[in-house]
Image (cartoon, rainbow, N blue to C red):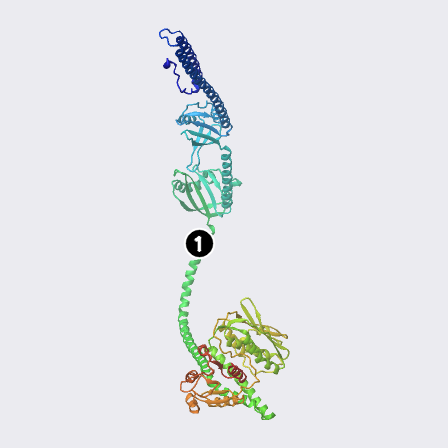
Amino acid sequence: MASLMSVPDKIETPVEGERDRRIAELEAENERLKRIRDALIVRVESGSAHKPEPYAAFEHSVVLAEQVRERTEALSQAMEQLKGSNKALNRAREEAETTRQRLSDAIESIADGFVLFDNQHCLIQSNSRFRSYWRHAGVDAPGQGTRISDVKRQAVACGLVLEEHSHPDSEGVVFLLANGRWVQVTERPTREGGLVVLYSDITDVKNSEMARRIKALEESERWIRVVTDHVPALIAYIGADMTIQFCNKVYASWYGRKGESPLGKRLNEVHSPEFYQRLLPQILDVMDGHNVTFEFEETGEKGEVRHMLRSYVPNFDEQGDIIGFFVLIRDITDRRKTALALEQAYDNLERRVKERTAALTGLNSQLRQEITERAAVEARLRDAKLEAERANLSKTKFLAAVSHDLLQPLNAARLFTSALLEQSFGPKAEGLVRSVSTSLDDVENLLGTLVDISKLDAGVIKPDVTAFDLRDLLNNIAREFRQMAMAEGLRLDFVASSAIVESDSQLLARILRNFLTNAIRYTGNGRVLLGVRRQKDHVLLQVWDTGPGIPEDKLTEIFQEFKRIRPSGSQPDKGLGLGLAIVDKISRMLGHEVTVNSIEGRGSVFSVRVPVGKLKPRQPTADQNRAVSFDSGLGGARIWVIDNDQSICQGMKTLLEGWDCQVVTAVSLEDLERQLDPASSAVDLILADYHLDNDENGVDVVAEINGRRRCPAPVVMITANYTNELKQHIRELGHLLMNKPVKPLKLRSALSHLLRS
């Protein structure tokens, strides 16, 4: 009984199709169990085989009743669970139906044709857009279960698809349908292995693309016609049926009879039968695939005869078949006439050449003789020119070489006259001495100018370009020329500047001195201005005057040698006209631009353009241009003078003793040693000439003297040598260099500076 009353602990959940059947079975099972329960109770109560005790029978019935009750409750719970599952299943079915309807609505709302295939590529679902394509073709759309291959085959068989186009770069295949619409087919796989196919209508895109192509072709055709109509040649295209399919205006004008265009006509209709027969062999040749070029003579509608050069070029299609040929015809009538004229001219020229050859043969021998004579004359002229150049160079080198010897006596005379000027001889004698000094100044200036121009021409002077401060250079030049200007009744104004420039200080000073000398010389009254204008990377050193000015046509001549522009009514000067020539040569050597501006009757301004520089750190050296008081004496300074010229020694001694100096002169080191002991004798300063006798020089002599002394004496080296090598050598030794002829005031200033420092 227990086994008959057992109920399965687990009731399987029914599927949707078996729900009702399963419910009926459960209800029948429930009724059967109830009947078994009632039968068992009756059997226990009425059984006679065993006669248990009343209490045991009661207890057994209670147990059975409890088991029946438990089984009944379990069955009731299973029924409740079954009812809940049934409700959930109904809700899921309703939601699935709603989702399916929404999906169907979404598919129907797609503007493109939509088809869904399962993993076996059988049709599951399609929208009305897809089915409408088939209705336009007059056939039914494929139903569910149709394979995709059968769908494609039916579309072609029923005439739904007229054309198919595919391209490797495009997203899908493009079809032209029977209704004239273009669709692009795009296939997308699903996750279950199925396939979604979309049919997108691209008719508008194709139409716009076709419109653009047509417009581009029309524009291209327009440009081709514009170009060909302006080409001075006859251009046409002939089809395989010998019909003129294209021609330009020139072709239509020549072959258009009675104003009718040849376009669209056959060649045998355009040309006369005779002319067409002449063209026929060439036409057959080009239709055979060959390029043909030939020349024919033609007669126009008005009877004019023209020579035409024709070119036929075949036109091949993609399969290599000839579908026509291009025609290019050029009018070469003028060229033919020119060729005939040239041929006649050539014949005439050949005849004339023969005649002239005979005449020129006689002249040729005469020309050879004249050439020989001219060659001899040119050779003599070249020799004379070389001789003159050698003589000029020799003169220049001679002047540059003997400058020392030329300046020696002049330097001595300068020293003597400077010493005499400091003595009191009475008014008459002082006037004579001043006249001698003035004459010496003139001789010194003239000789110095000649020597300078010779040295510049000979290339003896080389620029020593360094960076320096303009302050001392301009101060010294202004101080030097202020007295000269006052002597001429002029006022010299000076604008100081501390600009740093890149140049040769001595050569730049020479340019400014020549500017100031000319300004003072030619300015009758008024003033002279020396100043500096700062620019971006240059400074402009300028000298202004209030003189008579320079005519505009003479501005370039003033820089030529021996050229002097003297205003009318002015006193003749003693110059050679070399001052500005020296300025021009120095400025070219330094690379400085020199300019002059002048207004007649108002004055002139001379300018030199000098680049800005930057000072390099260096050891302080003696500054020969530093301003000192000229009025103070030298306070009994002990000075040794070494010069191989006895007159120089005597003049220097006289001048220095007039400045309260104790002077010892010598022509050599041996001469000095005879007078004193260079190693122990007291000395404050040594004045030495660079060029001494017996191939000695002052640098070696003072080096020997200072080498013996415990405390070296300061040195002033005097020379007529202007080379940069010597200047740099003296500077490296720490000596002060002065060039001959020595100006006494400058010498006194330098000595005072050295002795005080």
Q: Position of residue 42 (x, y in %)?
A: 41, 8
Would you place residue 664 above or below residue 628 in this image?
below
Judge by depth and name the residue closer to the eye, 601 or 622: 622
Name the amino acid type tagged 1. Answer: Ala
Number of dots carrying numbers: 1
Residue projecting furthest to the left: 49
Badge 1: few (under 14), some or many (20 or more) residues near its Cα, within 10 Å?
few
Of helix, strand and loop, which one carries label 1?
helix
Identify the residue position indicated by label 1 in the image: 339
Q: Position of residue 723 (x, y in %)?
A: 45, 78
Judge by depth and name the residue closer to the eye, 314 or 338: 314
As drawn, is 423 to the left or to the right of 42? Answer: right
Q: Residue at x 50, y 32 (%)?
A: 203
User: Based on the displayed image, in which of its 4 quarters is residue 150 positioned?
Assistant: top left
Q: Position of residue 531 (x, y in %)?
A: 58, 73
Q: Is residue 719 visible?
A: no
Judge by depth and name the residue closer to the eye, 18 or 281: 18
Judge by depth and name the residue closer to the eye, 590 or 567: 590
Q: Quadrant of the N terminus?
A: top left
Would you place residue 356 above or below residue 726 in this image?
above
Q: Position of residue 519 (x, y in %)?
A: 59, 78
Q: Residue at x 51, y 75 (%)?
A: 505
Q: Is residue 51 visible?
A: yes
